[in-house]
Amino acid sequence: MSLLEAAPALPRSGAAARYRLTAEQRRIVTALAYPIIGAMASQNVVNLVDTAMVGQLGDKALAAVGLSSFVNFMAVSFMMGMSSGVQAMCARWRGASRSGEIAKPLNGGLLLVVAICLPATVALLAATPKILAALAPEPAVAETGTAYLQYRLLGMTAVGMNFSFRGYWNAMNMSRLYMATLVSMHLVGIALNWVFIFGHLGAPALGARGAGLSNAISVWVGTALYFALAWYHGRGEGFLQGLPSRATMRTMLAISVPAGLQQLLFASGMLALFAILAHVGTASVAAGNVLINLTLVAILPAIGFGLAAATLVGQALGEGSVADAYAWGWRVSRFAAGFVAVLSIPALVAPDLLLMPFLHDPATRELAVWPLRIVALCAPLDCVSAVLMNSHLGAGSSRTVLVVSVLTQWGLFLPVAWLLGVRLGFGLVAIWLAQSLTRMIGVTLFAQSWRRRAWARVSM
C-alpha cells in the first residue's frame, strides 16, 4: 500500500475542509518534503565550505570559481527538466499500480540524459576558454576559471542522471534515499577538496582546478550510489530491465524539454538581473547578491513541498482521481504557505541581524533591509506558486509552467526592473517591489490554470 493509498478519503463538503490536511495527510506530505529540504540544505552548506576553501587561494581564484560555477549551473539547468519527466511518469504509473514497470521511465530518462549530455559535454569543453574569456574581467581569472569549469563539466552527464534518479525516488515516496545519497556525495566532495585543492595525502596541490576535479568525482560517486540503490530497491519494478515504449519516451520528452527550458531561462534571468544591478551601482550588486542567496535558501521549503505535491498529484491521476489530484495541489499549498510564513518572521522583524554577517558596510546593509522585508512578506505567496508550479509538472503540464515562468520573469519582471531601477533611478527597493508584483501575477496565473484543470487531460 502506498502512502497515498493510506490517506483518508477527501471530505466532500466545504472548501476549507477539503483543503485542510488531516494529521495522516500531514505525515504523508512531510515524509516526502522534509528529506528533499534537508538534501537541498546540505547543498548550501557544501557551497559555503567550498567558498571558504577556495577563498584561501585569493580573490582571483574565488572570482574564477564563482563565475565558472554560475556558467556550470546554466549548463546543467536544462537537465533538471529530466527529473520532472521521470517523476511525473513514474508517479502516474505507481498510482495506476503498474507493478514491474514503474522504473522503466527512469531507464528511459537515463538513456536520454546520456544521449544529450555526452555531445553537449564535448561541445562545452571546447567552448569553455572562449566563454570565460568573454565573461571574466582579467586574463588570470579567465584562465583559472577555464580549468575549473572544464573539470566540472566532466560530471555533467552524472548530474543529469542524478536528477533522473531524484525524480524516481520522489515518485516512489522514497525521497530519504535522495537525501542520504546527496549528503554522502557532498561529504566526499568536501574531503576531496581538502585533498586536491591543497595537496594533502600525497596528491598534487591543484588549487581551483582541484575544486573542479573534486566536484566531478563526487557527482559520479553519487551516480554510482544511485545505481546501487536503484538495483536493490527498483529491480522488481523493472530497473535496467527494458525501456518504455516509444510513445512513453515521446511523452517524457514532451514533459522534460519545456521543464528544462524553464530552468535554463530562469538561470539566464538571474544573470540578467545581475547585469541590471550592475547598472544601478556596486553597492546594489553586493546587496542584491546577498538578497538572492538568502532568497534561494528561503525557497528550499517551497521546492521540497512542491516536489512532494508533484508526487501526490501524479499518483492520484494514476489512480484515476482528478478530484484528489486537484485537492492535493491546494492542500500542500496551504500547509506549505503557513510553514514558510513562520520561517519568514525573523527576516520581517529583524532583517538587519540577518544581513549583518554578509554585509559589513552599514550603508550597503541599510540598502538591503527593505528588499529583505519584501522577500519575507512575499515568501508565502512564492511558496504557493512553487507548489502549484510543481503540481502542474506532476500532472505533466510542463508547457504551462514554461509559459507562465517566461512571461513573468522575462516578459514582466526584467523589463520593469530595468525601467524602475535603472532608467528611472528608483534603485534596489523598486527592483524588489517589481519582483514581488510579478510573482503575485505568477501565482495568480498558476492558480487559475489549476482551477481550470486542463492539466488533467495530459495523457501518459
Image: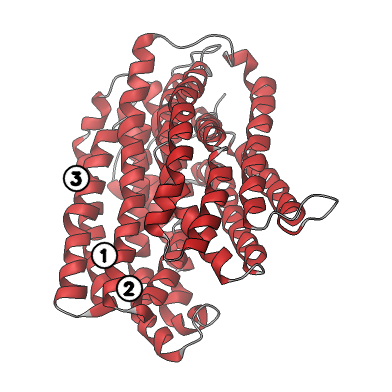
Image position, residue 235 (x, y; %)? 64, 16
In the image, 401: left or right of 135?
A: left
In the image, 420: left or right of 11?
A: left
Mark-to-mark CA distance, 1 and 2 = 9 Å
- Helix or strand or loop: what does disc 1 sit on? helix
Q: Which mark is residue 169?
A: none
Residue 352 visible, this angle: yes
| Up-down relation of residue 399 to residue 31 (above or below) | above
Residue drawn at (24%, 24%), measured in percent from left and top? 457
| Up-down relation of residue 339 to residue 74 (above or below) | below
Mark-to-mark CA distance, 2 and 3 = 24 Å
The residue that label 2 is drawn on is 374
Residue 20 visible, this angle: no
Mark closest to the chain's N terminus, 1 or 2: 2
Residue placed furthest toward the right: 201
Kind of residue indicated by mark 3: Gln
Residue drawn at (65%, 26%), measured in percent from left and top? 227
- Helix or strand or loop: what does disc 3 sit on? helix
The residue that label 3 is drawn on is 448
Q: Which mark is residue 435?
A: 1
